Image (spheres, coloured by chain):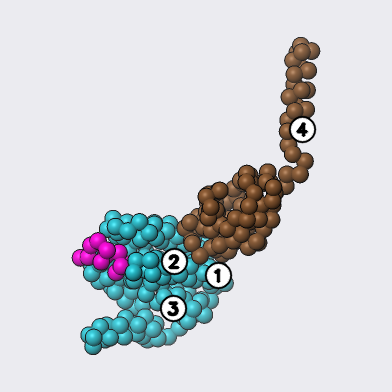
Amino acid sequence: MQPGCLRLMIAAFAFGVTAIPAHAATIQIVIENLVYAPAAASAKVGDTIEWVNKDVLAHTSTAKNGDFDVMVPPKQTVTSVLKRAGTIDYYCRFHPNMKATLKIEP
Amino acid sequence: MLVRLGAAIAAVTFMSGAALAQGKLTDPQIAHIAYTAGVIDIAAAKQAQSKASNKDVRTFADDMVRDHEAVNKQALDLVKKLNVTPEDNDTSKALSKAAADKLAELGKLSGPAYDKAYVANEVAYHKTVNSALQAQLIPSAGNAELKGLLQTGLKIFQGHQQHAEHVAAELK
């Protein structure tokens, strides 16, 4: 391997590390028996939401204002990154009586 | 009016009457009733997928097929695991007969009249099934896993009932 190539790899590695914002967190929201828990969660822009569906049914997490629409298949976990701030009311498109709120700070 | 009342009473009593005549329901019978109830709603929803004109009604029908197929798959997996053979019984038979009649009746309707009748029947049907689950099937279930599945089913179907009521209100 040439020294130039190695330098490039180190640079790429260093860039990769610094590109991850230090404050980004992962927040888990569990769907079980047609209920989002917690019903009111807080996060920041750039955070990842881990949607855990424990039901045998397919669900969605759909923002009322259209900011996100995440499909969460039965017995699966899906992640999504929050892109915009706001207090978002979301629901399940398949079970419209499932509702919760996500407060996203800038 | 009298005829309609008579039919309503018959519809309400056939479930409890048939079940009472047999005494306490056994787990294989309960599994059969619950599975049959799901099959009935899937058949009604498939008819709605091809007949309904209103977008919300079609979406509701899609939801019913997806959920009831998922729950019935769970039920089949469970009876296999427990090595239980679902057993046909008078309640299942009465349910199937009433559902076949209803499907034929709805089949004659079209347009908004069909949409309204389908959704109204979904409200009534889920109400009947939910009260049967609460009053009879769940308390009678012996196996804990079967009881658990029925309890989960009840939560799901209560959601369906609310959803159907919401769609029904929008159609008015």
Q: Is residue B118 magenta?
A: yes
Chain A rendered in what hue? brown
Q: Residues within 10 Å of mark 4 (few under 14, many from 20)?
A: few
Q: Is residue A17 left or right of residue B105?
A: right
Label 3 Cα crowd, 10 Å radius (few <14 / some 14-19 / many 20+): some
Please report contact status of discs 1 and 3: CB closer than 8 Å, yes or no: no
Instruction: State the mark number for residue B163.
Output: 2
Instruction: Identify the image quadrant of residue B42.
Output: bottom left
Identity of the residue furthest to the left in this view? B108
- Disc 3 marks which residue? B132
Residue B92 location in percent, x, y?
Answer: 36, 73
The residue where tag 1 is placed is B148
- What is the spatial separation of the Cα atoms under label 1 and label 4, in whole angstroms? 49 Å
* SS under mark 3: helix
What type is the residue that disc 3 sits on?
Ala
Q: CA distance from mark 1 to mark 3?
A: 15 Å
Q: Which numbered mark, 1 or 4, is in the foreground of this view?
A: 4
Q: Is residue B109 left or right of residue B16?
A: left
- The boundaries of the magenta stretch are B108-119
> Quick check: B110 above or below A75?
below
